[in-house]
Image: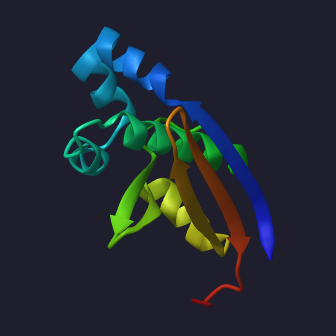
Amino acid sequence: MIQAIGTDLVEIDRVRKLLKKHGGKALKRLFTEEELTYALRHQDPAPSLAARIAAKEAFQKCWPESLSWKEVWVGMEGRKPVLRFAPKVRARLEAEGLFAHLSLSHEKSHALAVVVLEARALGAG
């Protein structure tokens, strides 16, 4: 059963401007090492970084409390992006039987993320 849906759209050029203005400081504040390892291997990391910002914002729209930038992040399972969580958030998701689905997309000017928070029966896979 769907508990919540969150979506966010990020302009990729805004991320490029942020990186140009604040560089490594912005990267360290907004992203985990796992996210940076993935994004920075691309010739242009801005689309991947913008998609990750969108994912964090989309999840935040599903979550009842404010989170810091590094309490939720995007990891990869093969070619599939997945949300990963700080221990406190993960524990609460598990305790409440919640599972987060993630879809990312980007094109020339924008990156999009959609998060669906699914309520599952406790103990269900």
Identify the residue at the far front of this view: 108
Q: Position of residue 107 (x, y in %)?
A: 51, 43
The answer to whether residue 83 is seen in the rendering is: yes
Q: Is residue 42 left or right of residue 51?
A: left
The figure's colour scheme reads rainbow
Q: Is residue 85 above or below residue 66?
A: below
Q: Position of residue 95 (x, y in %)?
A: 61, 71
User: In which image quadrant can residue 15 be found?
Assistant: top left
Quarter of the image containing the C terminus?
A: bottom right
Q: Position of residue 64 (x, y in %)?
A: 72, 46
Q: Residue at x 39, y 17 (%)?
A: 18
Q: Residue at x 49, y 20 (%)?
A: 14
Front-lying residue, 43 or 119 = 43
Identify the residue at the far top of this view: 21
Front-lying residue, 28 or 49 = 49
Quarter of the image containing the N terminus?
A: bottom right
Q: Is residue 100 above or below residue 39?
A: below
Q: Is residue 26 above or below residue 96?
A: above
Q: Is residue 11 left or right of residue 121?
A: left
Q: Position of residue 115 (x, y in %)?
A: 64, 57
Q: Residue at x 60, y 40 (%)?
A: 57
Q: Is residue 66 left or right of residue 21?
A: right
